Amino acid sequence: MAGTRPDTRLARWLVAGPPLLYLLVFFAAPALIMVLASFRSPGEFGGLAPLVDEAGKVDLNVDSYARFLTETVYMQVFVKSAWYAGLTTAICLLLAYPLATLIAKSAKKYRDLLLLLVILPFWSNFLIRIYAWMIILGPNAALAKAVNGVLAVFGAGPVPLLFSGFAVLVCLVYVHLPFMVLPLYANLEKHDQALLDAAQDLGANAWQRFWRITFPLSLPGVYAGAALVFIPALGIFAIPDILGGPEDTLIGNLIKQQFLETRDWPFGSVLSIVLTVSALVLAGTAAWVGRRSLGAARA
Amino acid sequence: MALLDIQGVTRRFGDFTAVDHVSLAIEAGEFFTLLGPSGCGKTTLLRMIAGFDLPDAGRILLNGEDIAGRPPEARPVRTVFQSYSLFPHMSVEGNIAFPLEMARVPPAERRPRIEAALEDVRLVGFNKRYPHELSGGQKQRVAIARALITHPTMLLLDEPLAALDAKLREELQIELINLQKEVGIAFVYVTHDQTEALALSHRIAVMNRGCVEQLDEPSKIYGFPRTRFVADFIGHCNLFSGPVLSNAEGIVRIDVAGLGPVLVAAQSSIAVGANGSIALRPEKTRIAAPQDANDPHAGGFAAALPPEGAHRAARGGPSPLVDPHAGGFAAALPPEGAHRAARGGPSPLVPDNRYRGTVADLLYMGDVTVYRVATPGGSRVEALLANSQSGRAKFFEVGDAVEVSWRVDAGHFIEE
């Protein structure tokens, strides 16, 4: 029984080959190009300066990295992005947990319908949904009038809802909520009611049953959902572009600016790399902490 | 006052009545079993005792107090679930400590109690293991330790051994008996496995379709089933039914289709013509080579053999006694047969039931062989023979002509 039969191996490569090739060409190669670009100089009219200059010298430097580290404004934008993404993740978790629980506990015939409702927004275009929020939050819409009406009673306001951090956060939560609901649901749906019965039988009240049994067992779902929300929220640019004010420039906007407006490709590449690496580090840390806290809960 | 008093409890699910006016009392320190097929209401009853379900009618009193208003977490009753329900994210120690934490037992007090509990179930040193690192039997022991650590007044066990293999089950049965003796609290055990119920219990309530059919000690349940259901459900049983032909002097004679008249010792006031049943355990049925192959009356009544002859016949050897009166009631028996009239019932002059047939099929089970004998009339009689002689697997083969017989007091009469 030693080794794998050659034809099985061939079949395996034939099946896995195309997607591997696809990832290599369209993901690994561009990432490599980006890394390379981050060490080059910006071109006179945008883009990249020639790799080898007239003097025959290879032009590779860390100037763009130095710029990111020395000019604090970029770090501030980065921290602000992380803050928005973190807040979005936390709010999504608080909203999604009861929703996912409800779906997981509902009768089988309603479950599919409820799940369909959760993913229904995906059926309409992402940008259209963001523009819809412009209308909802606009100064002449009912919501803004109601809020400012209430504020006026207390002698405050009026405040604009649109083009604010508030608008960005609301839309970030709205867009990412399904990504938290689905993994949480997938986890909670598998929970064994018998464990909760056992906990109750052993003297646990409703809160203790949730906190000691349901929640610890749902942590894999929580981490998966958090990663699925936090990482895209960290790099998003369309929402702050459309709904945010001038203060609400996030790292995604900055990267977009570097490539499309300032045309400083090396610096744009540096920002992208910082974003990617920090997302990877965060995801890795979350997974590690998750495993450890699960272990600690066990010990 | 009984520890647990169940009074007229009924539970319906839509049109289905899961538990139908059940009343029973469980005493302190008793090993009590609810036995029945799936859907008989035994688990529903257990869940109502635990508090996971509430009766639609009737009351459940624990120590004289109606516990209807108390949720499961507030009842001094613990359950061991069929699937063990150990918390997968907690170690053995964490699992066992859980009820102590819920009861706000100070941490300093927990440790010695956990150690003692692990000792009780022979799992010392398993503190840091996780449920997925334990075998089925070990998981079951952890579940029991966890349920017992807060000293409940009653332990409910819902088919706790169903998921284990036969050998381990037997071992754990003995452990359960010892553990129950040791802790001294009442165990209420739910199972569909009659051998388990017979082996473990002080008393058994046999349930069928939401009702208790019989509540008795194991030996009474097995030996004197009160209904056809109980006779059939507990162990293997030949069940013969038919109209009563006569009822006199402690002997009931019923007419069984395919077999003819069958006699049974019974103190019954049943009227002639009414329907009755006889439950006969296969191990009380003798099987032997026919006494006379040319007997023209095969299949009818034959005279009883003296016990010595019967034993010889059972071993397949030739019997010296051949009955000349086969087909009708036999003449007087030799006096040796007199001791047969146990329990003062039938007169020693009453002959055994005796029928001819052929072996239709047989089941060799190692220690015993079960023979199913087909009578010419189309009836089936099951007989069990112990293979006590080494190297001897079977006495008869399929198709062999045989004679089955049993004493009139071997069967148990059931009125219907």
Image (tube, grey):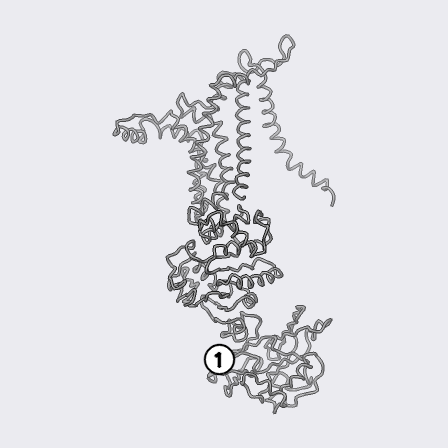
Give how far across and how far down residue A70 sits, in percent. 51, 17
Question: Considering the numbered disc 1 on the image, is that residue within a helix, a strand or a loop?
Answer: strand
Image coordinates for residue A74, horizontal then vertical, percent: 48, 20
- Give the answer, above or below, for where A100 lies relative to A159: below
- For the point 65% across and 69% down, the residue is B363
In the rendered image, the quadrant that contains the C terminus of chain A is top right
Q: Quadrant of residue A145?
A: top left
How many tags in the picture?
A: 1
Disc 1 chain ID? B
Which of the pair A236/B220 is nearer the observer? B220
A149 or A114, nearer to the observer:
A149
Residue at 39 percent of width and 67 percent of height: B8
With respect to residue B202, does A84 lie above or below? above
Indicate the position of residue A148 as horizontal and vertical percent values.
Answer: 29, 28
Q: Nearer the viewer, residue B408 or A266?
A: B408
Q: Which residue is mark 1?
A: B275
